[in-house]
Amino acid sequence: MDESETRAGTVALVGLPNAGKSSLLNRLLDSKLSIVTPLAQTTRERVVGIDTRDGVQMIFVDTPGIVEPSYLLHRAMGHVVGEAIADADVVVFVVDGTKSPPRIPDETLERLRSAGARLLPVVNKIDAASETRIAEARDWAAANLGRPPIEISAEAGTNLDLLRSTIAARLPVSPFLYPEDELSSQSVRFFVAELIRETVFEQFGQEVPYSTAVRIEEFREAETPVLIRASVLVERPSQKGILIGKGGAAIRELGTAARDKIESFIGAPVYLDLWIKVLPRWRKNAVELRRLGFTVPEDKA
């Protein structure tokens, strides 16, 4: 590549839940953008992170984990994955090296194969995986995706320079698409909502986080402290009771932890006003999903 040339393009991070896509995005950006929890299916929407260095601008798109849809929200999440695969200049398919080879819905596997030379398989978590598991993942990628994977650890940073250089070589020669100091094309409001949702995942049991959505109702950046009013939406009154807790203890703990994260993210003091609201069956309601910003394919609605 000529020294005067720059490269730029989109890089979709795709894989099953808990493969480590969000951790990989954060590590590649040297900044936390995607929320990360031990629970699967934490990511619901595309998360865009921009990395510009050494004449290359990589616009990473973290995507929801690939699942067999059991309700409408899952279908909306699958739509995000399909669009990301279709639109990206490079598709990084992340495999969890600590687990058995992935089982992917046939439709998604065909989408991946149709990406052709844009597809780049990656086996993650090699620092924690056995040699047997890594070999299984390597063989699976060769047999199902037609090419050997790059073996990395997002946690330990292993082979990330190799991954970067491989991605860079596949991006088109192009002017930068965003200013060099820009970290994301998404709004601060989006990331504030994600940080609140991450805190719900951290503080509550298996059922409640998956029934929860966060909507930012008010965001006054000009005030000191910054005023943020947010609604945490749940599907049932019993879930509302769990989030509020006895005497309001749970919501106070949630608000304190979320506020600390938001203040660190925006670099300013925050007054966070949380409200818990019941929105019955929102995960299965096309109208409510669209109001929350999800894209629901018309033929699936």
Image (spheres, rainbow, N blue to C red):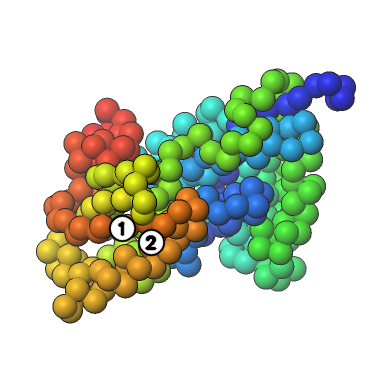
Q: Amino acid at mark 2?
A: Arg
Residue 34 in sight from this viewpoint: no
Residue 43 as seen in the image, left or right of residue 228: right
- Note whether residue 85 is visible: yes
Q: Secondary structure at mark 2?
A: helix
Residue at 50% across / 34% down in the picture?
185
Circle 1 sits on which residue?
272
Q: In the rendered image of this protein, does residue 154 appear above or below residue 88?
A: below
Check residue 259 in the rendering and tell me which mark sits there, or answer none.
2
The answer to which image quadrant residue 119 occupies is: top right
Q: Is residue 249 above or below residue 192?
A: below
Picture mark count: 2
Which quadrant of the structure image shows residue 57? top right
At a point 27% along the width and 41% down the height, the residue shown is: 292
Mark 1: few, some, or many residues within 10 Å (few <14, many ≥20)?
Answer: many
On residue 50, the disc is none
Q: Is residue 61 above or below residue 250?
A: above
Q: Position of residue 264 (x, y in %)?
A: 49, 58
> Callout 1, which amino acid?
Leu
Of the 4 image quadrants, the one containing the N terminus is: top right
Circle 2/circle 1 CB separation < 8 Å: yes
Viewer-proximal residue among 24 and 244: 244
Residue 161 position within the rendered picture, expressed as x and y whole percent measured from the top left: 78, 49
Residue 9 percent location from the top left of the image: 64, 28
Badge 1 element:
strand
Instruction: Name the side, left or right, on which 236 lies relative to 196.
Output: left
- Of marks 2 and 1, which one's residue comes earlier in the chain? 2
